[in-house]
Each structure stands twice: as C-alpha cells, then as structure tokens.
Image (tube, helix red, strand yellow):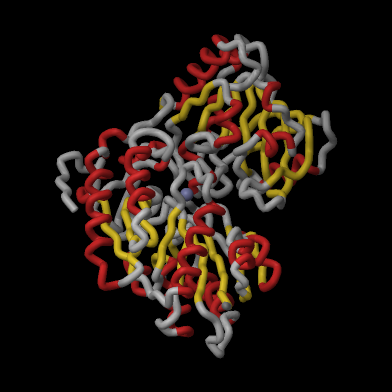
C-alpha cells in the first residue's frame, strides 16, 4: 500500500497587517517531513510505503499572496507521482487559511491535487477546530477530521484519525462522502474551551455519532472569528463510508448543529474580561490577595499573536508604564511579555547587559498601535523559543528593565505560551507577581501554573470585542451574536 502525505497549515487573521511568505513557514521537504507528521507510525505499522511531499506550518497572520501560495501548492502537487502508483492521499491543513485573490486556501490545494490524480483515489484531510469551512472542499476531499479540543491537545490524534479513516478507505475500497451544516455563529474563540460548558455538551455528540461505523468522521468546527471571509463561522460535518447514505450524514449534522445553536447564549468568557486599565488593577489586587508564588496573568487579547495579530502593539506597555504606584504595592515586579519590535531589538542587541538606552517601542506593523518612548536597561539577551513545538527558536529577544517593571522585546512575532519559553530568555515566571502576555485564553502549560488569569479587552487585530470588527464579505446580520433575534433551524 502506498500513501502520499502532505501538509500546508496556516490560520488567517484577515485583519492582520502581516503578510506571510514561504520564508515564514517552518518548512520541510521530501523525506525530512515524514517524522514531522503524527501519522507516520500508524502507516508504518500497516506496511504503508509513505510518499512524502512538503510540510509547511506558519504562525497565524494575514493573507499570503496568490502567487506565493500557488507556488507552494504546486510544489506539493509536483511531488505526487505522475504515474498515479499509490492508493490514497493524506493531507494536514488548517481549514481557516485564506489567500489574496484565491480565498479559502484548502479547496484550492485540494482541487489542484484532484486535477492531477483524478477522483478514484480517497483523500483524507485533518483540520483545525477553528476551520472556516468552504464547502468546495467537499468536492475534493472524501474524509474530513477536525481537532476536538481547544486549546488544541489532540493535534497528533486528529492526524491519526484521518490516517485510520484513509486506511479503511483503501482496505475496503471506499470513496466516502462528507457533508456539512453551517451554524450561523461567529463567537470568539476565547469563549470556547472544549472541556468547558457549553462545548462539552456539543463535542461529545460528534464523538458518540462516530461509534456508528458508517459515520467515518463527525466533527464540530468553531470557525476562526478574525476572518472577514464569506465562509466564516461554525459548522458541523459528517462523513459517510458510502455516498448513498448521505442522508445519515446530513441528519447527524443537523441534529448536532441544532444543539450547538440552542446553546449559543452559553458561550461566555470563562475568566474576567475587563477594560485594560481595570484588568491591570484587578491583576494587582488578585496578586496581592494570593499567597501562591505563581504570577497572575493578563492577556493582551487584542494583540494575540496565536490568533494572527501583529504582536507589536504598545497599549499595555503604556499602561504598565503609568502604573508605578500600583505596582509598588506588590512584593514582586510585573513583567510585560513579548512585544515585537525589530528596530528596537537591533539597537539593544548591540549593547551590553547593564547598559541603558532610550527606545521607542510599538507599531512597527500595526499602524494603529500607540508607541512608547522609554528609558530601559538591558538585563538579558538571547534567542527565544518558538511556540509551535518544532524546537526552533523565534529569533533574538532582549529582556529590559523599565524601572518599575520588566519587558521582553522580540525581533519576531512570538507567543509566550509556556514557562519553557520564558526560561529560554532567562526568566523564571515565579519571580513576578503579574505577567502580561499577548494571548487570549492561556495555553495549558501557563493555565496550570497561573495563580489567576484576566483578559484585558485591548484593541488590535484580534480584539475579542467582535462588534468592532468590520466584516465586508458577509452580512453580520446573518450571524449570532451580531443579530440576537436570528432564527435558525437546521
Ligand atoms: Zn485552532
């Protein structure tokens, strides 16, 4: 048995000014990619000869150009054997990538693949829970499997589910059919943690439905809300092993979609979400009330790099700078984590630890960002770990003292999602009472150790105040919560 494998993954934030190029992708080619995908051991156990193509994964950001994306896809497709001597194709994509002029990225790649290989071989695709599904994908993919966790803890598991489904397709000579029902919801991803109510009432329905062997995959997709695309929003998909049973798939989608809709008002922030200055004041109050050595985290949610924002806004930098008296009530200092400013890092990198300079930080990408000009003392210089777990670093970072607080300034956009990433720039998080990060909800490794967490409702490309987002590609009135009177019945 021979299976072609490939992966191009990125989540778009169409409000972000960052234009990714292929250089922004963690990229592997040919044999090198085989160990990067989680499905390899499964395929090897089943005696599969794996035919590698390309693997590309980039942090969320704005739209790629059509030319760059087309070349990326072309490279993947060109590595599929011309003689069609293989049995199936396994792909790992995001589902909410979007490209200038092209639109939804995944159907474009899938169509290019089908144009080359035809329609008589099964294709299984693994996607992210935050996919904004464009229905064209179902014309080309037989099986769709999505993550079932947010924060995402089942990325390998989802790849393997898609791999197992593909093996079954090949062994039983199946060409399954996937259908979907769109649920008219555009709800902040920060209101949806799958382990918590209400998604913990919805996702198990999909998992249970999959116990029927005819239903090869049943998924709930929450959508990526920072995407002004016509296919934005939530959806439920179901794959049937035999296309003649498509009614079973549709009925399954409708049942779960109606449940999802019925619980729409239950999606809420699970932690305090406050105006930025109030968030800082509450964080200090919380830190002072706790005996734990661990810090209280504040999420600068409008500039959340893991949601594709620029990561260079200085709103919280300014607020921290104006909070001297407040911070002096704490036993330990405050830390501002991970503002991206390459010119400032260039300047500070030339200096020695202990030296002082006046720097201006903020707005190198996001032209709407405030800036701050401030005197800083260099405390530490080193590269900072990347956040996507590939072991690479995210470039140079400088830790500076700003008097009554410290700050980490990075040359590239980064995301401080774990204590290890802080440690890579010489920081023990327990040395601080409060830490501000450019995230939404805390990733599990920070959530585990945080004494408390508060969302600051800051401005930026990933603002969680969704009413302030301007959608041009879809009518907000057709979605909850923009239209609270909306009626839906799948
Ligand atoms: Zn996601």
As displayed, is residue 108 above or below residue 26?
below
Question: What residue is drawn where x is 76% and y is 40%?
Answer: 348
Give the image location of residue 95, x and y in percent. 43, 60
Q: Position of residue 85 (x, y in %)?
A: 56, 86
Asked if one can make out residue 9 in the rendered structure from this viewpoint, the answer is yes
Residue 253, by quadrant, is bottom left
Instruction: Answer above or below: position of 168 versus 182.
Output: below
What residue sits 62% from the left and 72% below the top? 47
Dividing the picture into quadrants, the one containing residue 421 is top right
Q: Which x, y percent locates residue 220? A: 36, 51
Instruction: Tell me which corner region of the image, top left, top right, bottom left or bottom right, holds residue 215.
Output: bottom left
Q: Residue at x 14, y 46 (%)?
A: 487
Q: Nearer the viewer, residue 77 or 17?
A: 77
Q: 83 left or right of 35? A: left
Residue 207, image x and y in percent?
38, 49
In this view, 287 is above or below 133: above
Q: Judge from the rendering whether residue 154 lies leftward or rightward of residue 225; answer left or right.
A: right
Q: Could you tell me if residue 222 is visible in this image? A: no
Q: Nearer the viewer, residue 271 or 336?
A: 271
Q: Is residue 410 left or right of residue 206?
A: right
Q: Residue furthest right?
A: 352
Compared across the picture, whether 467 is left or right of 284 comes to left
Of residues 472 and 481, the one nearer the viewer is: 481
In depth, the one of 460 and 50 nearer the eye is: 50
């Amino acid at each position: 048995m021979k299976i072609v494998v490939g992966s191009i993954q990125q989540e778009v934030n169409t409000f972000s000014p960052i234009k990714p190029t292929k250089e922004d992708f963690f990229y592997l080619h040919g044999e090198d990619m085989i160990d990067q995908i989680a499905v390899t051991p499964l395929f090897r156990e089943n005696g599969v000869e794996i035919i590698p193509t390309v693997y590309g994964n980039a942090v969320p950001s704005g739209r790629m150009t059509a030319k760059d994306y087309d070349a990326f896809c072309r490279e993947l497709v060109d590595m599929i054997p011309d003689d069609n001597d293989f049995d199936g194709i396994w792909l790992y994509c995001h589902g909410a990538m979007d490209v200038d002029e092209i639109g939804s990225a995944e159907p474009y790649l899938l169509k290019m693949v089908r144009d080359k290989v035809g329609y008589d071989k099964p294709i299984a695709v693994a996607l992210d829970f935050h996919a904004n599904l464009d229905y064209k994908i179902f014309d080309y993919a037989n099986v769709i499997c999505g993550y079932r966790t947010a924060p995402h803890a089942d990325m390998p598991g989802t790849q393997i589910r898609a791999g197992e489904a593909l093996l079954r397709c090949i062994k039983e000579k199946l060409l399954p059919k996937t259908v979907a029902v769109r649920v008219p919801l555009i709800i902040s991803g920060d209101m949806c943690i799958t382990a918590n109510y209400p998604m913990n009432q919805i996702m198990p329905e999909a998992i249970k439905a999959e116990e029927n062997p005819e239903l090869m995959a049943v998924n709930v997709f929450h959508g990526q809300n920072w995407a002004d695309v016509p296919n934005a929003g939530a959806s439920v998909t179901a794959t049937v092993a035999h296309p003649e049973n498509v009614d079973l798939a549709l009925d399954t989608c409708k049942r779960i979609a109606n449940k999802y809709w019925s619980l729409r008002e239950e999606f809420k922030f699970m932690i305090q979400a406050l105006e930025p200055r109030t968030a800082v004041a509450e964080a200090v109050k919380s830190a002072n009330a706790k005996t734990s050595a661990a810090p209280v985290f504040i999420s600068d949610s409008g500039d959340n790099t893991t949601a594709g924002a620029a990561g260079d806004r200085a709103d919280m930098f300014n607020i921290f700078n104006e909070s001297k008296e407040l911070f002096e009530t704490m036993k330990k200092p405050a830390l501002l984590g991970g503002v991206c400013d390459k010119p400032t890092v260039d300047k500070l990198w030339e200096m020695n630890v202990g030296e002082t300079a006046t720097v201006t930080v903020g707005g190198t990408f996001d032209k709407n960002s405030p800036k701050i000009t401030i005197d800083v003392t260099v405390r530490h210089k080193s590269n900072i770990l990347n956040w996507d777990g590939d072991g690479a670093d995210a470039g140079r970072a400088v830790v500076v003292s700003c008097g009554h607080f410290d700050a980490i300034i990075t040359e590239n956009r980064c995301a401080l999602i774990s204590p290890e990433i802080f440690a890579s720039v010489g920081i023990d998080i327990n040395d601080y009472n409060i830490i501000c990060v450019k995230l939404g909800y805390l990733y599990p490794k920070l959530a585990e150790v945080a004494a408390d967490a508060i969302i600051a409702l800051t401005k930026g490309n990933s603002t969680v105040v969704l009413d302030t987002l301007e959608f041009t590609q879809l009518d907000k009135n057709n979605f909850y919560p923009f239209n609270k009177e909306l009626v839906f019945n799948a």
